[in-house]
Image (spheres, rainbow, N blue to C red):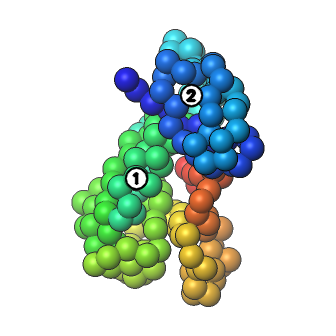
């Protein structure tokens, strides 16, 4: 049985809804309020994907998710697959893997957690930037995500360059998709 990610209109938190429950009343596991899950989009004409492709064309867009939390990667992947159906989404579980993945495959956007083992998101960003400068290629847009207070150095990176962004967890589908759409 497939599932879809749904944001509760009462508490704003995301939770999974089984496909066969879409369009029906469901209970949020977080706030216990009842609400109607949105009906699934028509497969033949998904309006958001038609509009997206009309605006942005059909060239492959590549997004890398770098987060050590497998659950976060799974939720973000679903959000991106539904909201940006023309994008290829790959995953890395730490900053070192993100750096290695970027060296092999040039991504348009990297969604990067700040706190990860092996190499954190800020160090990975700096190494990717150094690599891009050395290769004389464009730096990808990086959307930093954190559930903690972001360091001033990351806030400065985002303030100095609007191609980068900072999202605080928990975040919403709309915030993620808006940040991605503004950078593709």
* Real-space CA distance between mark 2 and mark 1, rounded to the nearest whole angstrom: 25 Å
Which residue is pictured at 34% across the width and 72% down the height?
95
Which residue is pictured at 56% across the width and 28% down the height?
49
Spot the residue most to the right: 10
User: Relative to 35, is 64 above or below?
Assistant: below
Between discs 2 and 1, the one toward the N terminus: 2
Q: Residues within 10 Å of mark 1 (few under 14, many from 20)?
A: few
Q: Is residue 62 left or right of residue 22?
A: left
Q: Position of residue 146 (x, y in %)?
A: 54, 70
Q: Is residue 144 left or right of residue 160?
A: left
Q: Is residue 51 left or right of residue 140?
A: right
Q: Position of residue 93 (x, y in %)?
A: 31, 63
Which residue is pictured at 37% across the width and 74% down the height?
116
Q: Position of residue 125 (x, y in %)?
A: 43, 75
Spot the residue most to the front: 32
Q: Nearer the viewer, residue 72 or 163?
A: 72
Which residue is pictured at 37% across the width and 23% down the height?
1
Query: In this orientation, does residue 143 appear?
Result: yes
Query: In this orientation, does residue 57 appear?
Result: no
User: Relative to 108, is 174 above or below?
Assistant: above
- Which residue carries the number 2 mark? 49
Residue 59 image-quadrant placement: top left
Q: Residues within 10 Å of mark 2 (few under 14, many from 20)?
A: some
Residue 143: image tag: none
User: Relative to 61, is 157 above or below?
Assistant: below
Q: Nearer the viewer, residue 35 or 165?
A: 35
Q: Position of residue 141 (x, y in %)?
A: 52, 63
Spot the residue most to the top: 44
- Which residue carries the number 1 mark? 71
Viewer-nearest of discs 2 and 1: 1
Q: Secondary structure at mark 2?
A: helix
């Amino acid at each position: 049985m497939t599932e879809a990610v749904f944001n509760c209109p009462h508490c704003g938190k995301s939770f999974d809804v089984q496909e066969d429950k879409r369009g029906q009343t469901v209970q949020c596991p977080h706030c216990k309020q009842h609400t109607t899950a949105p009906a699934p989009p028509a497969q033949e004409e998904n309006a958001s994907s038609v509009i997206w492709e009309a605006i942005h064309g059909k060239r492959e867009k590549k997004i890398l998710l770098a987060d050590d939390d497998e659950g976060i990667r799974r939720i973000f992947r679903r959000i991106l697959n539904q909201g940006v159906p023309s994008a290829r989404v790959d995953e890395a579980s730490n900053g070192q893997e993100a750096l290695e993945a970027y060296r092999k495959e040039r991504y348009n956007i990297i969604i990067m957690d700040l706190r990860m083992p092996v190499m954190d998101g800020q160090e990975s960003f700096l190494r990717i930037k150094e690599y891009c400068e050395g290769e004389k290629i464009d730096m990808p847009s990086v959307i930093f995500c954190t559930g903690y207070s972001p360091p001033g150095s990351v806030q400065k990176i985002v303030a100095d360059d609007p191609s980068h962004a900072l999202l605080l967890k928990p975040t919403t589908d709309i915030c993620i998709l808006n940040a991605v759409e503004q950078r593709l």
